């Protein structure tokens, strides 16, 4: 016991010396977050779980800590365990295209190892500095057209349960836990190691179409949806005050046979000055947009010039952007993300409601992008029971509590509308939705809670999402 207290003190000091993540991507009004402990080995972690079990303490888990609504924050004087030191590649099978990693590793750390072997990740977020464990627990998706969501490329993982037992979980072994843990927000146990399928790195070429919004879904269905040549796809909507959401830039990336080495060198040469310039321009643009709505009128025009067909990029480079490349200003403003998953035949209807409410609530919408998510029937808390269009909103809230309340009311209107249209919304962001709405759009939520209590009878694994919705 004494030994464990000492261990806790050591890791706590380590944690407070720079690991606390203060990014304002998370909202400024969130619940205060207890100091994190950062175990350096599996045996430290097992000791922590056994200690928590014996002393009836709660545990919450932290990956890269980018979720926005207290999904990594527990209850009372429990432990808040950060997995960032368990960040190694355990095994890489180059010819079999699989890798086993510790759960605290970030995608960019993994990419730095597999890039040299001509391999790439199949599915992840649009940015690379999230942890693999946090990504599994949310069952993330990105711009990859066929491999989303992440559960599709997970082979197996090791789970540390609330009784301190390390078990293998796969579609064959302890199979019920496979769909409970992936997308289970750290409520079933601690993911220790993950085995993932990889794919070949390759060179892609960009295609761009600029469309009126009413042609968007038809264009996607005809040209992108089942096109085996397309690797990545996303779409950006116009935010001009006079033609809010009326136009869309559809960007897709097609496989080519071009040489990886030549493309790497080419994009490497231009990357440094270009990304510096673009990042500064984007940061300035966003800073201005945060303050001055009129800049948005110019921005779409600039974006139409920037996104040109023909540019080439490797899969790995495309998937390696850091969160820093998402602009925000540093003046204490809060930014929130929201995401809605809408069946394709209802997308236009949802966008109409979105447009009307963005105006009515006077929301400073900085980005609205669309991506594709494939139906997932494996994850118990699946957010896409049919193929869906994922609509991601990036909102500048401002600084005041009142403004935050306005954004949450807006979020709730959109959640209601998504539900009416047979869609869902994403849970790693602010917990705007009511309990009844979450249970309505996640029909297996009650079953999830029942099974959590079965596998974790003392409800040791805890976070704000569970407290609000269980
Ligand atoms: C700017 C921004 C952009 C984003 N873009 C995308 C995107 O493109 N696609 C997308 O799908 N999502 C996106 N997200 C959401 C993001 O994927 C989730 O918030 C994700 O959880 C972040 O990973 P993380 O490592 O920060 O996890 P954390 O926020 O640290 O944790 C997320 C959940 O996983 C649990 N957890 C963490 N590690 C473990 C573990 N080892 N074992 C068990 N449970 C664990 C935590 O307790 C928590 O409940 C974005 C978020 C932000 C802020």
Image: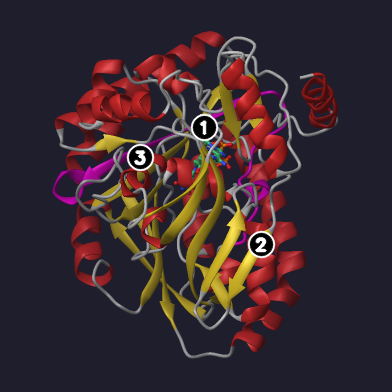
**Residue located beneath label 1 in the image:** 293
Residue 327 position within the rendered picture, expressed as x and y whole percent measured from the top left: 63, 43
- Residue 26 makes an appearance in the image: no
**Residue located beneath label 2 in the image:** 89
Q: How is the image coloured?
A: secondary structure
| Extent of the magenta region | 320-347
Residue 274 position within the rendered picture, expressed as x and y whole percent measured from the top left: 71, 65
Residue beneath the point at 33% across and 58% down: 172
Front in this rendered view, residue 38 or 454 = 454
Give me the C-alpha separation between circle 2 and circle 1: 46 Å
Vertical relation: 469 (above or below) 137: above
Residue 292 position within the rendered picture, expressed as x and y whole percent measured from the top left: 57, 30
- Disc 3: residue Cβ within 8 A of ligand 1's nearest atom: no
Q: Earlier in the sequence, mark 2 or mark 3?
A: 2
359 left or right of 276 in image: left
Residue 180 circle label: 3
318 left or right of 251 in image: right
Residue beneath the point at 39% across and 30% down: 455
Vertical relation: 299 (above or below) 437: below
Residue 324 position within the rendered picture, expressed as x and y whole percent measured from the top left: 68, 47
Q: Earlier in the sequence, mark 2 or mark 1?
A: 2
């Amino acid at each position: 016991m004494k030994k464990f207290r000492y261990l806790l003190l050591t890791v706590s000091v380590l944690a407070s010396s720079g690991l606390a993540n203060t990014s304002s991507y998370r909202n400024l009004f969130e619940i205060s977050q207890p100091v994190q402990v950062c175990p350096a080995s599996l045996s430290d972690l097992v000791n922590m779980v056994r200690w928590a079990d014996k002393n009836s303490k709660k545990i919450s888990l932290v990956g890269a800590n980018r979720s926005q609504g207290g999904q990594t924050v527990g209850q009372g004087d429990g432990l808040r365990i950060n997995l960032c030191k368990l960040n190694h590649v355990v095994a890489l099978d180059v010819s079999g295209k699989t890798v086993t990693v510790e759960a605290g590793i970030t995608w960019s750390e993994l990419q730095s190892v597999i890039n040299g072997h001509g391999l790439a990740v199949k599915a992840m977020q649009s940015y690379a500095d999230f942890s693999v464990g946090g990504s599994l627990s949310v069952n993330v998706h990105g711009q990859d057209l066929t491999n989303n969501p992440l559960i599709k490329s997970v082979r197996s993982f090791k789970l540390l349960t609330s009784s301190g037992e390390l078990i293998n979980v796969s579609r064959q072994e302890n199979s019920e836990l496979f769909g409970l843990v992936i997308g289970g927000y750290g409520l079933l146990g601690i993911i220790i190691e993950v085995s993932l399928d990889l794919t070949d790195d390759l060179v892609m070429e960009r295609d761009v179409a600029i469309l009126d919004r009413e042609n968007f879904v038809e264009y996607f269905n005809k040209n992108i949806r089942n096109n085996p040549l397309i690797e990545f796809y996303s779409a950006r909507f116009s935010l001009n005050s006079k033609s809010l959401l009326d136009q869309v830039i559809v960007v897709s990336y097609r496989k080519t046979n071009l040489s990886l080495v030549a493309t790497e060198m080419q994009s490497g040469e231009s990357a440094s000055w270009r990304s510096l310039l673009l990042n500064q321009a984007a940061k300035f643009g966003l800073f201005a947009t945060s303050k001055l709505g009129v800049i948005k009128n110019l921005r779409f025009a600039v974006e139409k010039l920037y996104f040109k067909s023909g540019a080439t990029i490797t899969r790995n480079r495309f998937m390696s952007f850091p969160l820093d490349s998402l602009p925000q200003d540093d003046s204490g403003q809060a930014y929130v993300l929201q995401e809605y998953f809408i069946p394709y035949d209802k997308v236009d209807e949802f966008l109409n409601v979105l447009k009307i409410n963005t105006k009515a609530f006077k929301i400073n919408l900085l980005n609205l992008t669309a991506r594709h998510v494939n139906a997932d029937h494996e994850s118990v808390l699946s957010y896409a029971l049919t193929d869906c269009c994922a609509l991601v909103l990036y909102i500048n809230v401002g600084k005041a509590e009142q403004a935050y309340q306005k954004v949450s009311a807006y979020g709730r209107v959109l959640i209601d509308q998504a539900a009416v249209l047979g869609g869902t919304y994403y849970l790693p962001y602010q917990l705007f939705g009511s309990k009844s709405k979450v249970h309505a759009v996640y029909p297996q939520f009650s079953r999830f809670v029942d099974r959590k209590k079965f596998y974790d009878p003392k409800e040791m694994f805890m976070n704000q999402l569970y407290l609000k919705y269980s």
